[in-house]
Image: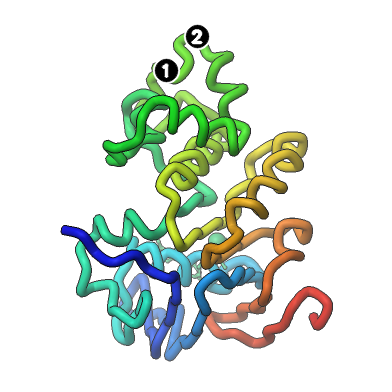
Amino acid sequence: ENWPEIKGEVEFKNISFSYKDDEKILEDFNLHVSPGETIALVGETGSGKSTIVNLLCRFYEPNSGKILIDSVDYRKRPQVWLHENLGYVLQSPHLFSGTIMDNIRYGNLEASELDIIRASKLVNAHDFIIKLENGYDTEVGEGGSLLSTGQKQLISFARAVLRDPKIFVLDEATSSIDTETEKIIQDTIQKVLKGRTSFIIAHRLSTISNADKILVIKKGKIIESGNHSEL
Ligand code: ATP
Ligand code: MG
């Protein structure tokens, strides 16, 4: 099916969520993000930052409330629609057994090998890939077990960039990447996020200083918000 291109507006409306029956992680959580805005989520460990973006990626469904993308409840669209419009790089990135090439392509059948190499170069994954004995044809193992976490993050990043989505989620996306590579891809991240709605969770201040808005999360609530100079 051909859906119209989205602008990338995101809205959390009265979201409540718990992983287990007895423990509400989010309660009546509300957030409006305009197309193209970069939002950084900060807050102590366990405060709910990943939970917020996990719901947006639809890894879990809210108990109540809605998540709207361009004013449409995402549950009214098939999973593939979200896939096309939202790219993510997670703290513990998930790869499936298959080659590096397969993992970057990930259902994106229109992408040529050249597109994949281009995306990999952009995020600085190409260098380590071509050093492997089988290059892009290297098998990553069950869940990517034959690669380091940093390498898996770079592959996820290439996969996300390849899709060219309007919404980007980076949850500690560079946490396991060495400082040298991190420095190099920092510029790329800024470039890639331009014109896209993005949610960034990061401990390194450098990663979030360019955000339009920084939200401080505590026990599933936004307790402060402002830009870098205001906070
Ligand atoms: P960190 O900075 O450590 O990544 P976070 O702000 O991302 O923390 P979340 O991962 O969203 O925090 O966790 C919020 C709460 O939900 C915590 O109390 C955590 O223990 C709980 N939680 C997270 N994931 C699960 C899960 N899969 N099952 C049950 N509880 C979970
Ligand atoms: Mg987290």
- The spot of residue 161 in percent (x, y) is 49, 45
User: Can you see residue 143?
Assistant: no
Residue assigned mark 2: 133
Cα distance in 3D space between marks 2 and 1: 7 Å
Q: Quadrant of the C terminus?
A: bottom right
Please, what secondary structure does the residue beneath circle 1 have? loop
- Residue 65, above or below 133: below
Q: Are marks 2 and 1 in contact (CB under 8 Å)?
A: yes
Query: Which residue: 71% across, 57% down?
Result: 207
- Name the quadrant containing residue 198: bottom right
Name the residue type under label 1: Thr
The one of 88 and 172 positioned closer to us in this rendering: 88
- Residue 16, above or below 195: below
- The spot of residue 12 in percent (x, y) is 42, 82
Circle 2 packing at 10 Å, graded few (<14), some (14-19), many (20+), is: few
- The spot of residue 143 in percent (x, y) is 37, 35
> Would you say 163 lies left or right of 49 here?
left
Query: Which residue: 50% across, 50% down?
Result: 89
Residue 138 is labelled as 1
> Would you say 174 lies left or right of 11 here?
right
Query: Which residue: 59% across, 22% down?
Result: 128
Please, what secondary structure does the residue beneath circle 2 have? loop
Name the residue type under label 2: Glu
